[in-house]
Image (cartoon, rainbow, N blue to C red):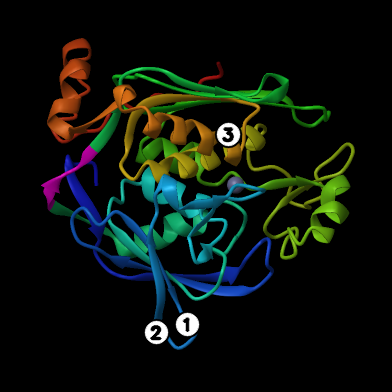
Amino acid sequence: MKGAQQTTLRDQAAVSGIGVHSGLPVTLTLNPAGDDEGIVFRRVSAHGSIEREIRADVRAVTATEFATVLGDSSGPLCSTAEHLLATLRGLYVDNVVVEIDGPEVPIMDGSAAAFVDAVDQAGLTARAQPRRYIEVIKPVRVSAKDGAFGELRPYSHGFRVEAEIEFDHPLIGKQALALDIEPNTFRREIARARTFGFMRDVAKLWSAGYALGANFDNTLVISEDRVLNPEGLRFADEFVRHKVLDAIGDLALAGQPLLAAYRTVRGGHKLNHSVLSALMADPSAWRVVEAAEAAEPARRRRPHAGFAAGLVAPAYGPEVS
Ligand SMILES: [Zn+2]
């Protein structure tokens, strides 16, 4: 659904699996929602009764260690929301109620593929209200140690992510990817990239209570010199693609789609969250626009872009920056 109107799901769709950190079984159901409801997480009991509800929003982030956790003053509501959030943003699902009967979104195969399938199964429908975007009008940058940083800057052609990672590991080393994010590029280039972890970190993670559900079916596991999963990599640079997936999910917590370019260098959930929080804290750095307004600069410069004509920003192929 590439229109300038807000969207929701046509029908329900359910996904069941286990949490990568908790190891607990969980069922998640995506439900249609009304205009301007955004992405709402609703915790339900095993019998289906509603326990608690929060809107997925940058202020609802309660932890960013190894995964993005959403909650409120009464505690965490659900963990590891980022791959689902990335899917909803990547496929332009504006309004949805996510019912979840456990503490963690299921990890599935470690990528967003199962959530893409669920959205496709439910289908999308356009609503009456125009989609509203958060347009970044001034760069906002947050630096961390060892040269890591994240920066949002104005970008007139939609939403773009530029990611660089560097790991002291022969299989990964330096990887970079820059991509305009719209449904086609999200599906093709990003959605199937899996979570990865190093064998050398497993004992440490387990003793801290993380990665209890991790296995070769849901995590790319890397030893000193190779991928231990028998099927190998889905993309030669699957690692940086997964970083892009995580960044899309973390930035979906802006609450509305961003019109911006996001550059992340050696970043992670924590830095993504810090940059988004810094943006929101500076009202002179962004404004809310509707699709037609958002189109103006892009249309002048690129006659074929046409947000207002009901199209999205043009899709570019992947390019290494
Ligand atoms: Zn991830």
> What is the CA distance from the residue labelled 2 to the residue labelled 1?
5 Å
| Magenta span of residues | 128-132
Checking the image for residue 49, the label placed there is 2
Q: Is residue 168 above or below residue 90?
A: above
In the figure, is residue 209 to the left or right of 15?
right
Q: Is residue 175 above or below residue 8?
A: above
Pointer 2 local density, CA inside 10 Å: few below 14, some 14–19, many at least 20: few
> What is the CA distance from the residue labelled 1 to the residue labelled 3?
33 Å
Q: Is residue 112 visible?
A: no
Q: Earlier in the sequence, mark 3 or mark 2?
A: 2
Between 248 and 16, the one nearer to me in the picture: 248
Between 20 and 181, the one nearer to me in the picture: 20
- Which amino acid type corresponds to the residue marked 1 in the rendered image? Ser
Residue at screen point 75% across, 64% down: 212
Q: Which residue is mark 1?
A: 45
Residue 225 part of the magenta-drawn span: no
Magenta stretch secondary structure, dominant: strand
Checking the image for residue 271, the label placed there is 3
Q: Earlier in the sequence, mark 1 or mark 3?
A: 1
Residue at screen point 25% across, 36% down: 133
Count of numbered badges drawn on the protein = 3
Quarter of the image for residue 186 reads top left
Q: Are marks 2 and 1 in contact (CB under 8 Å)?
A: yes
Residue at screen point 49% across, 31% down: 275
Dot 2: element:
loop
- Which amino acid type corresponds to the residue marked 3 in the rendered image? Leu
In the figure, is residue 81 to the left or right of 127?
right
Pointer 1 local density, CA inside 10 Å: few below 14, some 14–19, many at least 20: some
Between 36 and 261, the one nearer to me in the picture: 36
> What is the CA distance from the residue labelled 3 to the residue labelled 2?
35 Å
Q: Are marks 1 and 3 in contact (CB under 8 Å)?
A: no
Pointer 3 local density, CA inside 10 Å: few below 14, some 14–19, many at least 20: many
